[in-house]
Image (spheres, rainbow, N blue to C red):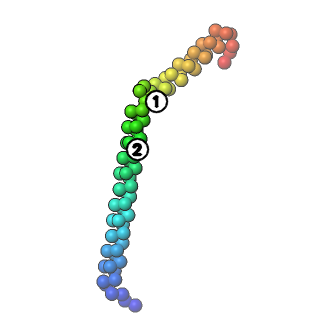
Amino acid sequence: MEQDPNFYIIIGSFAVLMVSIVSALGLRGWRDWIALKHAELDITRRASDTPVPSATSRIEVADLKERVKKLEAIAAGIDI
């Protein structure tokens, strides 16, 4: 059974239209989500008076605390 060529054109057009609509909605949702995250970050930055320490500085502080514990243990004569 041979189908009408217009059938394939209509189905193809419908598929392209649906992909376009889904893509547009996905892009809109993505942009709104990014805007929400920006707003959350702005609120967090404005709410805190003290600056947020970076991850590197937090790691360095943790490393220094660990070194101090080891030095205290050495001074107390405890082998770690």
Say which element carries label 2. Answer: helix
As drawn, the label of residue 45 is: none
The crowd level at tag 1 (other Cα within 10 Å; few <14, some 14-19, many 20+) is: few
* Residue farthest along the right direction in this orientation: 78
The crowd level at tag 2 (other Cα within 10 Å; few <14, some 14-19, many 20+) is: few
Say which element carries label 1. Answer: helix
The image shows residue 38 at horizontal and vertical percentages of: 37, 42
Front one among 79 and 17:
17
Residue type indicated by callout 2: Lys
Report the residue marked by disc 2: 37
The image shows residue 23 at horizontal and vertical percentages of: 36, 61
Q: Horizontal placement of 66 versus 57: left or right? A: right
Front one among 79 and 34:
34
| Residues marked 2 and 1 touching at CB (< 8 Å) | no
Report the residue marked by disc 1: 55
Q: Nearer the viewer, mark 2 or mark 1?
A: 2
Front one among 5 and 39:
39
- What residue lies at 38% left-to-right and 42% top-to-bottom? 39
In the displayed structure, 19 sits above or below 9; it is: above
- What residue lies at 33% left-to-right and 65% top-to-bottom? 20
Residue type indicated by callout 1: Ala
The answer to which image quadrant residue 44 occupies is: top left
How many numbered discs, if any? 2
Q: Horizontal placement of 68 versus 19: left or right? A: right
Q: Quadrant of the C terminus?
A: top right
Q: Horizontal placement of 31 versus 61: left or right? A: left
The image shows residue 68 at horizontal and vertical percentages of: 57, 15
Q: CA distance from mark 2 to mark 1?
A: 19 Å
Q: Horizontal placement of 64 versus 70: left or right? A: left
In the displayed structure, 56 sits above or below 30; it is: above
Tell which circle, 2 or 1, labels the residue nearer the N-terminal end. Answer: 2
- What residue lies at 39% left-to-right and 46% top-to-bottom? 36
